[in-house]
Image (cartoon, rainbow, N blue to C red):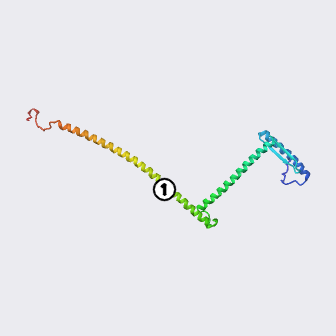
Amino acid sequence: MVRGKIQMKRIENDASRQMSFSKRRNGLLKKAHELSVLCDAEVAVIVFSQRGRLYEFSSHEMPKTMDRYYRHAKQVQKGGSDTASMRTKIEFLEQSKRKLLGQCSLSSYSSTDELQDIASQLERSLSNVRARKAQLLSEQIHELNAKEGLLLEEHSGAKSCVQATHKQENETYSSLSSNSTSEQVGTELFIGLPEMQIV
Protein backbone atom coordinates (compact mmCIF):
# COMPACT_ATOMS: atom_id res chain seq x y z
CA MET A 1 0.00 0.00 0.00
CA VAL A 2 1.39 3.39 -1.02
CA ARG A 3 1.71 5.91 1.76
CA GLY A 4 0.07 9.23 1.02
CA LYS A 5 2.14 12.36 0.68
CA ILE A 6 2.02 14.39 3.89
CA GLN A 7 1.31 18.05 3.50
CA MET A 8 3.98 20.19 5.16
CA LYS A 9 2.01 22.29 7.61
CA ARG A 10 1.49 22.44 11.33
CA ILE A 11 -0.49 19.49 12.76
CA GLU A 12 -3.50 20.95 14.49
CA ASN A 13 -4.36 17.99 16.73
CA ASP A 14 -2.23 18.12 19.94
CA ALA A 15 -2.05 14.34 20.43
CA SER A 16 -1.16 13.69 16.79
CA ARG A 17 1.40 16.49 16.88
CA GLN A 18 3.04 15.06 20.04
CA MET A 19 3.14 11.54 18.57
CA SER A 20 4.61 12.81 15.28
CA PHE A 21 7.22 14.83 17.21
CA SER A 22 8.27 11.81 19.24
CA LYS A 23 8.59 9.51 16.21
CA ARG A 24 10.39 12.03 14.01
CA ARG A 25 12.72 13.12 16.83
CA ASN A 26 13.76 9.51 17.46
CA GLY A 27 14.24 8.99 13.70
CA LEU A 28 16.33 12.16 13.45
CA LEU A 29 18.57 11.18 16.38
CA LYS A 30 18.94 7.65 14.95
CA LYS A 31 19.94 9.04 11.53
CA ALA A 32 22.45 11.41 13.21
CA HIS A 33 24.00 8.44 15.05
CA GLU A 34 24.19 6.40 11.81
CA LEU A 35 25.80 9.33 9.97
CA SER A 36 28.46 9.72 12.67
CA VAL A 37 29.26 5.98 12.74
CA LEU A 38 29.14 5.21 9.02
CA CYS A 39 30.90 8.36 7.78
CA ASP A 40 33.10 9.15 10.80
CA ALA A 41 31.55 12.62 10.90
CA GLU A 42 31.31 14.95 13.87
CA VAL A 43 27.57 15.30 14.35
CA ALA A 44 25.59 17.26 16.92
CA VAL A 45 21.79 17.58 17.01
CA ILE A 46 19.83 19.78 19.40
CA VAL A 47 16.03 19.65 19.51
CA PHE A 48 13.70 21.63 21.78
CA SER A 49 10.12 20.44 22.08
CA GLN A 50 7.13 22.77 22.09
CA ARG A 51 7.10 22.58 25.88
CA GLY A 52 10.82 23.48 26.09
CA ARG A 53 12.31 20.04 26.76
CA LEU A 54 15.83 19.51 25.39
CA TYR A 55 16.81 16.46 23.33
CA GLU A 56 20.34 16.20 21.99
CA PHE A 57 22.82 13.87 20.34
CA SER A 58 26.52 14.42 19.88
CA SER A 59 29.07 12.03 18.42
CA HIS A 60 31.81 13.91 20.31
CA GLU A 61 31.68 16.25 23.29
CA MET A 62 28.86 18.74 22.73
CA PRO A 63 30.74 21.86 24.06
CA LYS A 64 33.73 21.21 21.77
CA THR A 65 31.43 20.70 18.79
CA MET A 66 29.56 23.90 19.63
CA ASP A 67 32.84 25.87 19.95
CA ARG A 68 33.92 24.53 16.59
CA TYR A 69 30.56 25.54 15.10
CA TYR A 70 30.81 29.11 16.48
CA ARG A 71 34.37 29.52 15.15
CA HIS A 72 33.26 28.32 11.74
CA ALA A 73 30.17 30.55 11.80
CA LYS A 74 32.35 33.60 12.58
CA GLN A 75 34.66 32.78 9.68
CA VAL A 76 31.71 32.35 7.36
CA GLN A 77 30.19 35.61 8.59
CA LYS A 78 33.50 37.43 8.12
CA GLY A 79 33.89 35.86 4.67
CA GLY A 80 30.32 36.86 3.86
CA SER A 81 30.95 40.47 4.87
CA ASP A 82 34.20 40.48 2.86
CA THR A 83 32.31 39.04 -0.11
CA ALA A 84 29.56 41.66 0.25
CA SER A 85 32.09 44.51 0.40
CA MET A 86 33.96 43.10 -2.61
CA ARG A 87 30.67 42.78 -4.51
CA THR A 88 29.86 46.42 -3.69
CA LYS A 89 33.32 47.54 -4.87
CA ILE A 90 32.99 45.54 -8.09
CA GLU A 91 29.57 47.03 -8.82
CA PHE A 92 30.91 50.53 -8.17
CA LEU A 93 33.92 49.94 -10.45
CA GLU A 94 31.73 48.50 -13.21
CA GLN A 95 29.39 51.48 -13.01
CA SER A 96 32.36 53.88 -13.09
CA LYS A 97 33.72 52.02 -16.11
CA ARG A 98 30.38 52.29 -17.91
CA LYS A 99 30.26 56.01 -17.13
CA LEU A 100 33.81 56.55 -18.38
CA LEU A 101 33.04 54.68 -21.59
CA GLY A 102 29.86 56.73 -22.07
CA GLN A 103 27.59 53.68 -21.88
CA CYS A 104 25.27 55.28 -19.30
CA SER A 105 22.46 57.69 -20.08
CA LEU A 106 22.64 61.26 -18.82
CA SER A 107 19.87 60.52 -16.33
CA SER A 108 22.21 58.16 -14.45
CA TYR A 109 24.45 61.08 -13.47
CA SER A 110 23.33 62.72 -10.24
CA SER A 111 24.62 66.23 -11.02
CA THR A 112 26.77 68.31 -13.33
CA ASP A 113 29.52 68.07 -10.71
CA GLU A 114 29.68 64.33 -11.34
CA LEU A 115 30.05 64.97 -15.08
CA GLN A 116 32.82 67.50 -14.34
CA ASP A 117 34.57 64.92 -12.13
CA ILE A 118 34.40 62.34 -14.90
CA ALA A 119 35.74 64.86 -17.44
CA SER A 120 38.66 65.79 -15.16
CA GLN A 121 39.33 62.09 -14.51
CA LEU A 122 39.43 61.45 -18.26
CA GLU A 123 41.85 64.39 -18.70
CA ARG A 124 44.12 63.01 -15.98
CA SER A 125 44.00 59.54 -17.53
CA LEU A 126 44.78 60.98 -20.95
CA SER A 127 47.77 62.94 -19.60
CA ASN A 128 49.02 59.79 -17.84
CA VAL A 129 48.74 57.84 -21.09
CA ARG A 130 50.62 60.56 -22.98
CA ALA A 131 53.36 60.68 -20.33
CA ARG A 132 53.74 56.90 -20.49
CA LYS A 133 53.86 57.01 -24.29
CA ALA A 134 56.56 59.72 -24.19
CA GLN A 135 58.55 57.68 -21.68
CA LEU A 136 58.37 54.56 -23.85
CA LEU A 137 59.41 56.52 -26.95
CA SER A 138 62.33 58.08 -25.05
CA GLU A 139 63.47 54.63 -23.90
CA GLN A 140 63.24 53.28 -27.47
CA ILE A 141 65.23 56.25 -28.81
CA HIS A 142 67.89 55.69 -26.16
CA GLU A 143 68.13 51.98 -27.08
CA LEU A 144 68.35 52.80 -30.80
CA ASN A 145 71.09 55.39 -30.15
CA ALA A 146 73.04 52.80 -28.19
CA LYS A 147 72.64 50.30 -31.04
CA GLU A 148 73.73 52.96 -33.54
CA GLY A 149 76.88 53.64 -31.48
CA LEU A 150 77.72 49.94 -31.44
CA LEU A 151 77.17 49.65 -35.21
CA LEU A 152 79.37 52.71 -35.86
CA GLU A 153 82.16 51.20 -33.75
CA GLU A 154 81.86 47.91 -35.64
CA HIS A 155 81.86 49.81 -38.97
CA SER A 156 84.97 51.85 -38.08
CA GLY A 157 86.75 48.69 -36.91
CA ALA A 158 85.88 46.90 -40.15
CA LYS A 159 86.94 49.96 -42.20
CA SER A 160 90.33 50.18 -40.48
CA CYS A 161 90.79 46.44 -40.99
CA VAL A 162 90.02 46.80 -44.73
CA GLN A 163 92.37 49.78 -45.01
CA ALA A 164 95.17 47.84 -43.30
CA THR A 165 94.60 44.94 -45.69
CA HIS A 166 94.73 47.32 -48.73
CA LYS A 167 97.92 48.95 -47.43
CA GLN A 168 99.55 45.57 -46.97
CA GLU A 169 98.49 44.49 -50.46
CA ASN A 170 99.88 47.73 -51.96
CA GLU A 171 103.17 47.27 -50.14
CA THR A 172 103.41 43.70 -51.39
CA TYR A 173 102.59 44.80 -54.93
CA SER A 174 105.16 47.65 -54.90
CA SER A 175 107.89 45.36 -53.57
CA LEU A 176 107.11 42.83 -56.28
CA SER A 177 107.16 45.46 -59.01
CA SER A 178 110.50 46.94 -57.82
CA ASN A 179 112.05 43.46 -57.88
CA SER A 180 110.80 42.87 -61.40
CA THR A 181 112.28 46.13 -62.74
CA SER A 182 115.73 45.39 -61.30
CA GLU A 183 115.93 42.11 -63.17
CA GLN A 184 116.32 42.86 -66.89
CA VAL A 185 114.74 40.30 -69.11
CA GLY A 186 115.58 40.22 -72.76
CA THR A 187 112.47 40.93 -74.66
CA GLU A 188 113.74 41.95 -78.07
CA LEU A 189 111.96 40.54 -81.03
CA PHE A 190 114.12 38.58 -83.47
CA ILE A 191 113.12 36.76 -86.58
CA GLY A 192 115.28 33.93 -87.74
CA LEU A 193 117.48 31.26 -86.28
CA PRO A 194 119.12 31.94 -82.95
CA GLU A 195 122.69 31.46 -84.21
CA MET A 196 122.34 34.22 -86.69
CA GLN A 197 121.40 36.81 -84.09
CA ILE A 198 123.58 39.91 -84.41
CA VAL A 199 123.83 42.16 -81.42
Q: Does residue 157 appear to the left or right of 2 in the view shown?
A: left
Asked which secondary structure carries label 1, the reply is helix
* Residue at 90% in and 51% down: 16
Q: Is residue 122 above or below residue 67?
A: below
Residue at the extreme right of the image, as rendered: 15
Q: Amino acid at mark 1?
A: Ala
The residue under the point 78% across, 39% down is 38
Q: Is residue 21 above or below residue 123?
A: above
In the rendered structure, the answer to whether residue 68 lies left or right of residue 108 reads right
Relative image position of residue 179 (x, y in whole percent): 20, 36
Q: Which residue is mark 1?
A: 134
Label 1 neighbour load within 10 Å: few <14, some 14-19, many 20+: few
**Residue furthest to the top:** 195
How many numbered discs, if any? 1
Identify the residue shown where x is 38% and y is 47%: 152
User: Where in the figure is residue 139, as x and y percent of width and height?
Assistant: 47, 52
Query: From the image, which quarter does the C terminus lie in?
Result: top left
Q: Is residue 54 left or right of residue 163?
A: right
| Residue situated in front as seen by the camera: 67 or 98 | 67
